[in-house]
Amino acid sequence: MNVKNKSLLMMHMAIFMFGSSSLFGKLIHQPTFVIVAGRVLISFVITGIYFKLNKISIRLNSKRDYGIVLLIGGILALHWLAFYNSVKISTVAIALLTFSTCPIFTTFLEPIFFDEHLKKSDVFAAIFAFCGVIFVLPKVELGSSVFMGVIEGIFAGFSFALVSMLERKYVKIYEGIVISFYEQAIVFFLLLPFVLIVGIKPLDNTQIGTFIIFGTIFTLLSRLLYITSLKGVSAQTATVATCLEPLYGIILAFILVHEIPTMRDLIGGAIILAAVGYSSFNSMRETKIEMIEMPSQIPTEY
C-alpha cells in the first residue's frame, strides 16, 4: 500500500472514532473539564510509558517547536471543552452537525497559512453552511441550552480547523505519536486546576472502564491516526471525511442512548454537509487531487 492510500485509510479510521467518541459526553457522568482531562491523562500516560520502555527520544528540534506545540495543545483543550460541553447541554446530533462546519473554516484558513487565494465558491459554501446552522436552531433564545450547544459546536469546528492548519504547517517533520503526546500532556495540565475546582463525582467500575476505553482507543489511537494521516494528505482532503462523522455519531447515539434527531436537525445537517462537501470537493478538484480514486481505496461502508 502506497503512502497516499495508507494515509487515507488511517484518516477514515480516525474520523469514525471521532464520530463515535462524541457519545462519551453522554455516557460519562462527569463535568466537561473532568471528561476531557480524564481522556488525555490516560492517553499521554500510556504513551509516556511506551516511550520510556522503548527508550524513544521525544525531544523537539527547537524552542520554537515547543512553543508551537504548546499553542496547539491550548487550542485543542478549548476544542475538546467546547465540543463535549455542546454534547452535554444539547444533543449529539447538534454538536456533531455544527462541528461539521470545520471544513468551511479550513477553506478560509488555508489562504492565510499557505498563501492561497480565497475563491468566491468558498464564500458561497460558507453562507450556505451558515443557513444550515440557522435551520438547526428551533428558535433563537440566547440563553437556551440548544443555542449555546450550537455556538460551542461551531467554535469546536473552528478550533479543530485551526489545529489542523498548525499541525500541517509546523509539525509534519515529527512522528504523530510524539506530537500527540505533547498535545495531550499540555491539555491535561492546563485543565487540572479547573478539575480540582469543579471536583470529580464518585466513579464506579463501569465509569472507570469507560474512561479507559475513551482514553486509549478513542483518544490515543484516533489522534495518532489523524495526525499521522496528515503527512500523506492535505488538511482539506482530511476534513472531507468529517462529512461522515455526524452520520456515525447520530446512528450510535440512537442505538446506545436512544437520542433521536429532530427533522430540523436532519434538514439543517443536510444543508451543512452539502455546503461542506461542495467546498471540499471543489477545492480538491482545483488543486488536482484525484478524489475519484477514493472509492477503490476505502471500504464502501465509509
Image (spheres, rainbow, N blue to C red):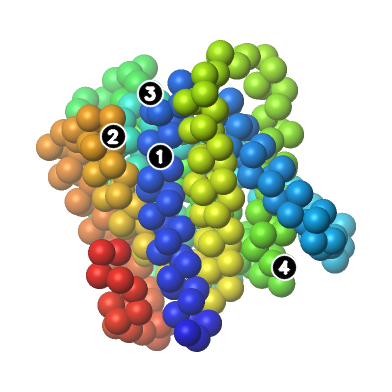
Residue depth check, mark 3 versus mark 2: number of the one nearer the observer: 2
Disc 2 target residue: 256
The Cα–Cα distance between marks 2 and 1, rounded to whole angstroms, is: 12 Å
The Cα–Cα distance between marks 3 and 2, rounded to whole angstroms, is: 18 Å
Disc 4 target residue: 174
The disc, 3 or 1, on the residue closer to the chain's N-terminal end is 1
The disc, 4 or 1, on the residue closer to the chain's N-terminal end is 1
What residue do we see at 34% from left, 73% from top?
298
Which image quarter: residue 193? top right
Q: Position of residue 234 (x, y in %)?
A: 50, 72
Q: Callout 1: helix, strand or loop?
A: loop
Q: Position of residue 54 (x, y in %)?
A: 80, 61
- On screen, residue 11 versus residue 36, left or right, reads left
Disc 3 crowd, CA 10 A, few/some/many (<14, 14-19, 20+): many
Residue depth check, mark 3 versus mark 1: number of the one nearer the observer: 1
The Cα–Cα distance between marks 4 and 1, rounded to whole angstroms, is: 28 Å
In this figure, what is the number of numbered marks? 4
The disc, 3 or 2, on the residue closer to the chain's N-terminal end is 3
Q: Given the current orientation, which residue lies at the most extreme front position?
A: 205
Which image quarter: residue 287? bottom left
What residue do we see at 56% from left, 14% from top?
201
Q: Specify the amino acid type for callout 3.
A: Ile
Q: Specify the amino acid type for callout 1.
A: Ser
- On screen, residue 293 versus residue 132, left or right, reads right
The disc, 2 or 4, on the residue closer to the chain's N-terminal end is 4
Q: Callout 2: helix, strand or loop?
A: helix
What residue do we see at 26% from left, 25% from top?
140
Disc 1 target residue: 22
Disc 3 target residue: 89
